[in-house]
Amino acid sequence: METKTFEQVIEFAIQREEEAIKAYGNMIEIAETPGLKTLLAELQGEERNHKKLLQELTEEKAESLKAEDVIDLKISDYLVEESPSADMTFQDLLILAAKKEQMAVDLYSGLAQEAKEEEIKKLFEFLVMQEKSHKLKLEKEYETRVLDEN
């Protein structure tokens, strides 16, 4: 993606959030257990909040953004992702969602490296941290609900 303006970057990021909202919505429809549906709805809500944040972001507000580093537990980096299905387990869902968040991290990281303007680079770095925080939440959930229980 060749970025030219702040507005184009924001629009691109909003489109990615809309895709994530839709993907989680599709998974909610096929999930069979209430627990899976609840977690998916929470994740979808986080993506909606992220979209709203982007919609309200101005260049002036972006100047004050701080891309604070987020730790990466790397739990999902070594796990195999299953395709979404009605009989997916809670574990499968956490892995799938964490992998999706990592793909967003990779996308925004690459775009940050390519950005020529400092404000655009800063915006992508902020988006990277937002996605990393989503992945961290999922990996902590995995650690608590899957690793600790086994």
Image (cartoon, rainbow, N blue to C red):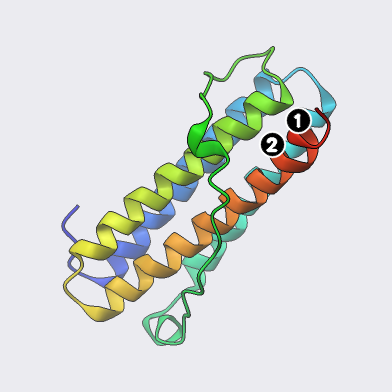
The foreground one among 65 and 55 is 65
The foreground one among 82 and 30 is 82
Q: Decide: few, some or many residues near mark 1? Use Cα within 10 Å; few <14, some 14-19, many ≥20.
A: some
The local secondary structure at tag 2 comes to helix
- Mark 2–mark 1 distance (CA, rounded to whole Å): 5 Å
Please say if the residues under marks 2 and 1 sit with CB atoms less than 8 Å apart. yes
Determine which residue is flagged by label 2. Answer: 40
Using the rendered view, name the quadrant where residue 96 is placed.
top right
Amino acid found under the numbered disc labelled 2: Leu
Q: Position of residue 119 (x, y in %)?
A: 29, 79
Q: Left or right? Give the position of 141 relative to 105.
A: right
Location of the C terminus (image quadrant) = top right
Using the rendered view, name the quadrant where residue 108 is placed.
bottom left
- Whether residue 97 is visible to the viewer of this picture, yes or no, is yes
The foreground one among 28 and 150 is 150
Determine which residue is flagged by label 1. Answer: 37
Query: Is 60 placed above or below 3 here?
Result: below
Residue 144's disc is: none
The local secondary structure at tag 1 comes to helix
Q: Left or right? Give the position of 139 relative to 122.
A: right
Q: How many marks?
A: 2
Query: Is 89 placed above or below 100 here?
Result: above
Q: Position of residue 116 (x, y in %)?
A: 16, 72
**Residue pictured at 76% horizontal, 17% vertical:** 32
**Residue pictured at 74% horizontal, 38% vertical:** 39
Q: Position of residue 87 (x, y in %)?
A: 69, 12
